[in-house]
Amino acid sequence: MTLYDIEVKTIDEELMHLRAYEGKVLLIVNTASKCGFTPQYKDLETLYQKLGNEKFEILGFPCNQFGNQEPGGGGEIKTFCELNYGVTFPLFEKVDVKGPHAHPLFKYLCEQKKGILGGDIKWNFTKFLIDAKGNVVDRYAPTTSPLKLEQKIVERIDKI
């Protein structure tokens, strides 16, 4: 199984395969609307506006597993992100990112790139950088600003 074999649902509940993003550099992030790191939505959008769409995509996956910081439904999450942070990058359905009900995408990401404290995601806004061939090349802690990843992303884009 590869990253591109995994099915996901958009925030609007449309089923799709990640194969749609094949050939692009990806930054996959588990997000939340009521987290201390929520302002990273602004930095993610800044990064997306600067680098995104043709060769780079940010994929946001809301998660409510950490401190009940994403209690809303898809429509509420989407509206919050658009109104408060101008988010235009793709958002997906709310998922579990750890434990027995973890979404297959996050099981895959965590198997491919362990964190400092092991495989499980420890908090919202953990970031995974994927190269254009679907390889998980790095994992970043919630405390890492998305803007600090710009050079690493550009290096991956330049290899396409």
Image (tube, grey):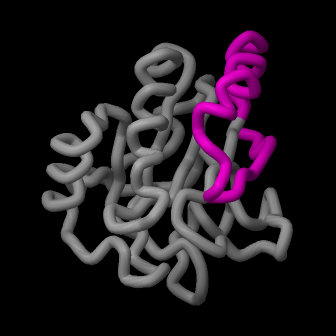
Residue 110 percent across, percent down from the top left: 72, 65
In this view, which residue lies farthest toward the bottom?
A: 100
Quadrant the N terminus occupies = bottom right
What is the quadrant of residue 33 in the picture? bottom left
Residue 26 percent across, percent down from the top left: 59, 35
Q: Is 24 placed left or right of 50 in the picture?
A: right
Identify the residue at horizontal 69%, vertical 57% (top origin): 141
Residue 138 percent across, percent down from the top left: 78, 45
Instruction: Please tell me how many numbered marks the rendered image carries.
Output: 0
Identify the residue at horizontal 40%, vertical 32% (top origin): 45
What is the quadrant of residue 35 in the picture? bottom left
Q: Is 17 drawn above or below residue 75 in the view shown?
A: above
What is the quadrant of residue 8 in the picture? bottom left
Between 46 and 92, the one nearer to me in the picture: 46
Q: Is 33 drawn above or below residue 101 in the view shown?
A: above
Between 37 and 16, the one nearer to me in the picture: 37
